[in-house]
Image (tube, helix red, strand yellow):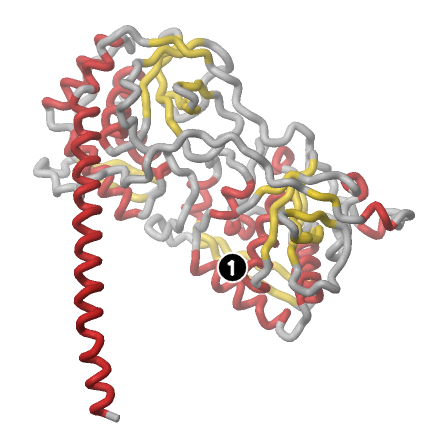
Amino acid sequence: MKNLLVFFSLSLLPCMAQAQTTSDTFQQFRSGVMEGYGKFRKSVLDGYAAYLDTVWKEYKAFRGDTRDEKPKPVTPPDVKDVPPVQQPEEDKPVVVQPEERPRQPQTPQHPATPVVPTVPQTPLEASFSFYGTTLKAPRMECAAVEQLTPQKAAAAWRQYEEGGMRKMAETMKGNARALGLNDWFTYEMVRECVNTQCGAATPAARITLQHFLLANMGYDVRMADSGGAPCLLFAVAQTVYSRGYIVIDGRKYYIFQDNGRDAPEGGSFYTCELPHDADPGSAMNLRLNGMTGMRTGDRHHCELTYDGITVTADVDRGQMEMLRHYPQLNVADYAMSVIDPKLRGAVLEQLRPHIAGLSEGAAANRLLSFVQHAFDYATDGDQHGYEKAYFFEENFFYPKNDCEDRAIFYAYLVRNLLGLDVHLIQFPGHECTAVCFKDSSVSGAGYTYGGRTFIICDPTYIGASIGQCMPDYRGMTPKVEEW
């Protein structure tokens, strides 16, 4: 047996060598592509001052989109208060066609920084606080820009280039990677660093420095001026709600003022034009894939209990503060994001014994009942004063939640505990879920999508079992939000 194993191992050597050669070839190809991209992108940045130093084009701003105009119910309905359905045929599945969504043009998904950053030679002399974490950065000064004009913007860009400010961009990118920051928090970190060191400068001066750093970090970001109010324009990979934007070459650019807030509605914005064949950089990606580098150690403990099930979880208060005013996205983007993988795993392990040995329908029902009753309900307006969907982990921090928060929570449990395909679905003023059961005996209100049947499971319809739809939405075709 020993000889057989030796022979078998040796027989793999030619294949392994071939695989190694193929891998090396691919890496050489990828390196060549990235090197070519790096040179192409660098040529855009090297010529950026010349683009700025031209007549800026006028763009009209659009009012920020609203995800759902209809208000949510102040109190969730309880199934015991709803008269029984008189006509069962109302619960026959409707057919939902996959939505043809207009897709925003995307830049190639290359790393924001094509070349691995070198360690800057400038001493790390300055520090700033970022959500309770002290970060260090080279000391810097804003160019003197009283008002954002093409000439002033171009002069500031040249001054930063000559002053070696690109090394500062490399340092900031390194900080972001070390902390595991996504693109949104990277932008916030840059803004905080600039505001700390250049707090006495004009908004126009801070905007020019933020723009230089972010553009050299690889982002598709523009400077703009609106009646003397400077701002940044960001391309974003997702749809952002309740934030104004302009459209350049068919692509949305969302408006961010010096303080990171939205600009007043309407108005004209002036910004420079880049050549149509130039790579503008990467769109900001607002999905999250773990925030393990930003932990304060200040934990909030939560305990959810119902029907013999108790789930406990500890969330980091610092992370919750970071997410408090996160941009408004589609519900599916919250569902696809991850804040704390360890917390999620612990939640699943606590729930798993309570559905062990149950059929699909019974397990889905038990989870549904738990989510319906373990949380208190409140609309975002009543609890926060603004629209705020929760990431999964935020449900353990705030005292109450509403329909989209419960839908995100329940969808995650069904997908990861039962291994079933689940949709997030939107009705006017309401969000819930629908599950595709492998067990054909499970029935109820639902719809067909791509030839498969999905059964309504509503975590906000108190006391409802799987297959029971709120009366206001029976027979209505929902909007499917795939994730």
> From this viewpoint, which residue is outermost toward the left?
121
Please indicate, yes or no, whether residue 463 appears anywhere in the rendered image: no
Q: Nearer the viewer, residue 263 or 216?
A: 216
Residue drawn 59% across the image and 72% down it: 353
> From this viewpoint, which residue is outermost toward the bottom?
1
Q: Secondary structure at mark 1?
A: strand
Location of residue 261 (image quadrant):
top left
Q: Is residue 279 above or below residue 263?
A: below
Percent across and percent down for residue 81 are 85, 48
Q: In the rendered structure, which amino acid carries the disc numbered 1?
A: Ala
Percent across and percent down for residue 434 are 66, 51
Q: Nearer the viewer, residue 132 or 166?
A: 166
Q: Left or right? Give the position of 333 relative to 78.
A: left
Percent across and percent down for residue 87 are 89, 47
Residue drawn 32% across the image and 25% down it: 221
> From this viewpoint, which residue is outermost toward the right?
86
Q: Nearer the viewer, residue 95 or 272?
A: 95
Image quarter (top left, top right, bottom left or bottom right) of the N terminus: bottom left
The residue tagged 1 is 313
